[in-house]
Amino acid sequence: MKVLIDACVLYPTVVREVLLKSAAAGVFTPLWSARILEEWRRAAARLNPVAAAQAEAEIALVKARWPEAEVDPKPSDEARLYLPDENDVHVLASAIAGSADVLLTVNIKDFPRGTLYEEGIRRDEPDHFLTSHFVQQPEVVKAAVAEVWDRAKTMEGCPPNQRALLRKARLPRLAKALTNLEY
């Protein structure tokens, strides 16, 4: 399954890392465009120069890890598409260019299901997507979350437990599914 990941999903860190660790384990094939990666970098730069530099390094790493993930939207697709926010047309055009099965975003209002359906693309948001894959491949997603949690514990301001980290990252259903697994 090919999944175009919107910039709002690539940034923040926890969601991105759980997703990409799942992708590395073969759950799905990630896709993005150069513009999407640039939006991630700009979002990080709004925090401070250190965050911008860190984003640039992380972008270089994901590009090296998945050199085939970057797609180029066709100008003809961008010209014919309409979305509520014209600044998101490039995201849908990128999904079309990459033959994505899913467009992963938190901006659901900007990507009407009917419009995506006409292009053969399903819209999903990270919490539902990861929880669905957890049901299908619990050990893979659980391992991805555990790796992210281990790294997060070394950072200042880390939530007190894995569930709190996931909830803070707007992954409450995944947090609940993992908690239910423990009982």
Image: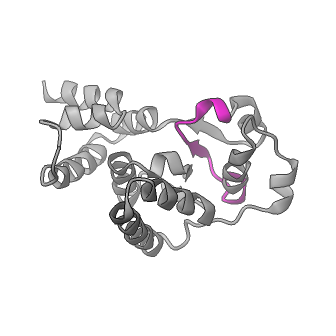
Q: Which residues are magenta?
A: 95-110
Residue 44 pos. (x, y %): 43, 56
Residue at left offset 78%, top offset 37%? 118
Quarter of image, res 24: bottom left
Residue at left offset 87%, top offset 48%? 80
Quarter of image, res 36: bottom right
13 and 100: which is toward the camera: 13
135 and 151: which is toward the camera: 151
In the image, 57: left or right of 121?
A: left
Residue 13 pos. (x, y %): 35, 51
When the figure is inspected, residue 23 is found, relative to residue 162, above or below; the finding is below
Q: Quadrant of the C terminus?
A: top left
In the image, 41: left or right of 168?
A: right
Residue at left offset 47%, top offset 71%? 63
| Magenta stretch holds residue 13 | no
41 and 78: which is toward the camera: 41
| Magenta stretch holds residue 109 | yes
Residue at left offset 55%, top offset 57%? 39
Residue 112 pos. (x, y %): 70, 31
When the figure is inspected, residue 54 is found, relative to residue 149, above or below; the finding is below
